[in-house]
Image (cartoon, grey):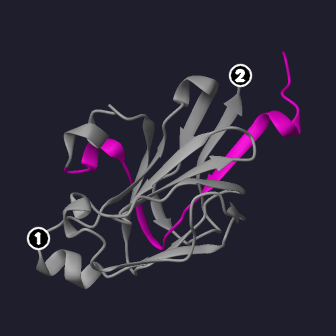
Amino acid sequence: MFQFSKKDKGKIFSPQNGKAVLLHQVPDNAFSKKMIGDGIAIIPEDGKVYSPVNGIADDVPNTLHNYQIKSDDGLDILIQVGIGTSELMGEGFKTYIKKGDKVKKGDLIAYADLNLFKEKGFPIHSPIIITNIENIKNVKFNVGNVKAFETVIMEYRKL
């Protein structure tokens, strides 16, 4: 049987404390039907958002509702904070990174006011999506309670 080398195996850690759920549980068709890519979602218990991998901030939109990170091993990872929160135009968000910044797993990249989101009727589900999923195989999703930058939420093999 063929064995993968350690460098072929990748891990994505939880960017938030909370509960990891499969995408079909996200109340948004773009995510639940995997139109953007495949991944998992966190129902966060606090507003701190950490980098789930080592890489570079590829995009931080003015609305601050999502963060795109290019991992050191070439994956494009989207961290969406809440559903529909782009409508807030940055209200309730604080960012600690900008496009082009190097990030390490566990770096604090953002803070989100989850209470504000709930008060305004926005679901707090936070999808973590691999948008270039075609570059990997054998993805394993780990659901349940997660601890930020400690719990592995996705494991994969590079093509």
* Residue closer to the observer: 114 or 45: 114
Under mark 1, the amino acid is: Gly
Instruction: Give the residue displayed 60% in from the left and 64% down from the top.
Output: 51
Residue 138 location, quadrant: top right
Label 2 sits on what residue type?
Leu
Say how many tags the image has.
Answer: 2
Q: Distance from label 1 to label 2 (Cα)?
A: 41 Å
Q: Decide if residue 7 is on the left or right side of residue 30.
A: right
- Residue at image mark 1: 121
Badge 2 marks a residue whose secondary structure is loop
What residue span does the magenta drawing correspond to?
1-27
Q: Is residue 72 above or below residue 67?
A: above
Q: Secondary structure at mark 1?
A: loop
Question: Along the horizontal axis of the image, is 21 left or right of 130?
Answer: left
| Residue 19 on the magenta span | yes
Camera-nearest residue between 81 and 14? 81
In the rendered image, which quarter is residue 74 located in?
Answer: top right
Picture quarter with the C terminus? top right
Judging by the rendered image, the residue that carries numbered circle 2 is 159
Q: How far across and how far down the image is residue 66, in percent? A: 41, 58
Q: Residue at x 29, y 79 (%)?
A: 114
Q: Position of residue 42 (x, y in %)?
A: 40, 61
x and y, in percent, of residue 128 in the image: 46, 51
